[in-house]
Image (cartoon, rainbow, N blue to C red):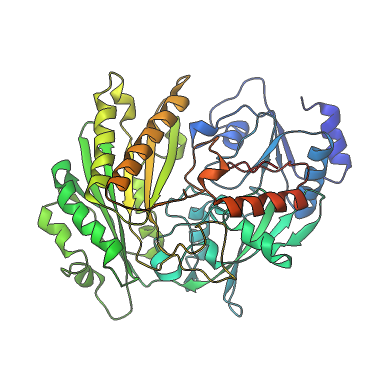
């Protein structure tokens, strides 16, 4: 219980940020609804208070107050709100800085905003940053959970491009993670497990002059042919400008379809469309007669969010859940396993509620995840230079009691089918991607044993009372 007296104590401690208390009646789109809404129903809880600090000093005061009164809390960055609590939400929405330093070729980002906001603010500048592929994804969680991007083939993981994190620790101190290299490494992949991040410094990268993007739709019977080409992108592609995603998507009133999303980074003096349609790039995509084609040349800011048009908007979602499977390569049975899972969902008596089920396959070129000692995080595992990513998504317009748990079971079933298919083809399974988690997943699912032990040592050093927990809980 968070009493009024406790909140008065907080303000008397020097906290000057916003305080929201749960109203008797919550109305759609009111301040409380917007502050506590989650994108994924597996994270939904019933908080009683939202604290929205305006400064690092506010954040420090809030943390000391929360620790003193042993209040459970969760840190909310600017996006999908995976981390939730039944007591207090620490909302970083006021931390929305986007400052480009041309002399240092760095961008300072506030963690409490979405990637749509970041890209919009950077539109006038000649640079961009390694950021999310979906507009509603938040900066803080993305840049601490790994960071898979369309530009990963060119620049590696987003976490590789982080220069430093400003962190408020459990004792209220404000430090830069670079003061302790082990802490900086842990922040790259272990979320908000060691403190509250209030600023992130990242490398500025040249903004592509254009991108060939969009998507092409195909009937499901084209999957096998398309999959062979996508598989080659993970084994034969040596051009970092070339990337793409293949989805198997359950479309309402249209059945199950294949969706191909090419993403080709343009260069000055080249026609992106002409390059994309070369037979050794994506020219084969039109040989299979897509039923719909939105592909074309786009500005970078628009191209990175092309996936958004395939999904419901967050405000319409009653249920959105995601998990993933990471493999060293793809194979025919892997693609088939994903498609069969969707078919089996739709064969259920309640199959209509799984209309938004999606399995996406994203290949990365060999060496794309190569890291140096200075940029090594805790994910991917040390020595892992390539991961081919599969995400499994269920989205619905309505959530009823028990749906979240059932959805989680179904997604785990899909992952197990994909792993079984991979084993049958001798494909290596890699530790899961921290940003693709089902709430309650054990930390062992994401980190190697030796890495996890190092994280526990750091927890005991920086957070001995274990007050911080991201969606992946590291117990000490």
Q: Residue at x 23, y 54 (%)?
A: 294
Q: Does 51 sit left or right of 332 as displayed? A: right
Total labels drawn: 0
Identified at 49% across, 37% down, the residue is: 438
Q: Residue at x 83, y 33 (%)?
A: 69
248 sits to left or right of 390: left
In the picture, residue 198 is in which quadrant?
bottom right
In the rendered view of the protein, which quadrant contains the N terminus? Answer: top right
Q: Quadrant of the C terminus?
A: top right
Q: Check the image and report above or below for 246 versus 440.
A: below
Where is 373 relative to 11, above or below? Answer: below
Residue at (44%, 31%) from the top-left corner?
A: 408
Q: Position of residue 189 (x, y in %)?
A: 56, 54
What percent of the width, then of the height, locates residue 64?
Answer: 82, 44
The front one of 94 and 48 is 48
Q: Is residue 165 visible?
A: no
User: Relative to the observer, which residue lies in front, 177 or 263?
Assistant: 177
Front-lying residue, 113 or 70 = 70
Q: Quadrant of residue 355?
A: top left
Seen in the picture, residue 226 relative to 320 is either above or below; the reply is below
In the picture provided, is 262 more to the left or to the right than 200?
left
Q: Please state if 5 lies on the left or on the right of 125 as rendered.
A: right
Whether residue 148 is visible, yes or no, is: yes
Where residue 228 appears, x then y in whole percent? 19, 55
Q: Position of residue 121 (x, y in %)?
A: 53, 62
Instruction: From this view, report whether residue 222 is shown above or below residue 89.
Output: below
């Amino acid at each position: 219980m968070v009493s009024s007296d406790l909140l008065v104590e907080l303000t008397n401690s020097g906290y000057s940020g916003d305080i929201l208390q749960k109203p008797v009646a919550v109305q759609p789109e009111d301040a409380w609804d917007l502050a506590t809404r989650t994108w994924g129903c597996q994270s939904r809880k019933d908080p009683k208070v939202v604290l929205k600090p305006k400064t690092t000093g506010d954040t420090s005061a809030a943390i000391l107050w929360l620790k003193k009164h042993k209040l459970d809390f969760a840190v909310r960055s600017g996006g999908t709100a995976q981390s939730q609590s039944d007591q207090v939400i620490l909302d970083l929405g006021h931390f929305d800085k986007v400052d480009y330093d041309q002399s240092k070729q760095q961008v300072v980002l506030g963690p409490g905003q979405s990637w749509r906001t970041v890209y919009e603010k950077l539109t006038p500048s000649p640079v961009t940053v390694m950021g999310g592929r979906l507009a509603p994804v938040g900066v803080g969680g993305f840049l601490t959970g790994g960071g898979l991007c369309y530009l990963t083939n060119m620049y590696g993981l987003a976490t590789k491009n982080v220069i430093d994190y400003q962190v408020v620790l459990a004792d209220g101190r404000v430090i830069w993670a670079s003061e302790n290299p082990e802490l900086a490494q842990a922040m790259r992949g272990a979320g908000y497990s060691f403190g509250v991040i209030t600023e992130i410094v990242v490398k500025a990268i040249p903004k592509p002059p254009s991108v060939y993007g969009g998507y092409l739709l195909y009937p499901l019977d084209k999957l096998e042919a398309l999959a062979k080409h996508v598989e080659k992108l993970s084994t034969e592609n040596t051009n970092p400008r070339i990337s793409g995603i293949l989805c198997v998507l359950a479309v309402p009133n249209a059945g199950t379809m294949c969706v191909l999303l090419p993403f080709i980074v343009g260069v000055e003096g080249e026609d992106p469309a002409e390059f994309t349609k070369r037979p050794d790039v994506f020219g084969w995509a039109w040989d299979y007669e897509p039923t719909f084609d939105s592909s074309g040349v786009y500005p970078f800011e628009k191209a990175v969010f092309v996936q958004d048009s395939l999904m419901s908007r967050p405000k319409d979602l009653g249920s959105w859940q995601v998990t993933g499977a990471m493999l060293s390569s793809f194979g025919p049975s892997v693609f088939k396993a994903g498609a069969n899972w969707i078919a089996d969902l739709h064969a259920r008596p309640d199959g209509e509620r799984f209309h938004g089920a999606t399995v996406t396959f994203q290949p990365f070129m060999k060496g794309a995840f190569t890291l140096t000692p200075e940029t090594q995080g805790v994910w991917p595992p040390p020595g892992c230079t390539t991961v081919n990513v599969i995400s499994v998504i269920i989205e619905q317009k309505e959530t009823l009691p028990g749906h979240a748990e059932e959805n989680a079971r179904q997604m785990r079933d899909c992952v197990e089918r994909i792993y079984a298919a991979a084993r049958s083809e001798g494909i290596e399974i890699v530790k899961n991607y921290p940003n693709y988690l089902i709430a309650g997943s054990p930390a062992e699912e994401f980190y190697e044993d030796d890495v996890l032990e190092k994280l526990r040592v750091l927890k005991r050093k920086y957070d001995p009372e274990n007050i911080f927990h991201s969606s992946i809980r590291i117990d000490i």
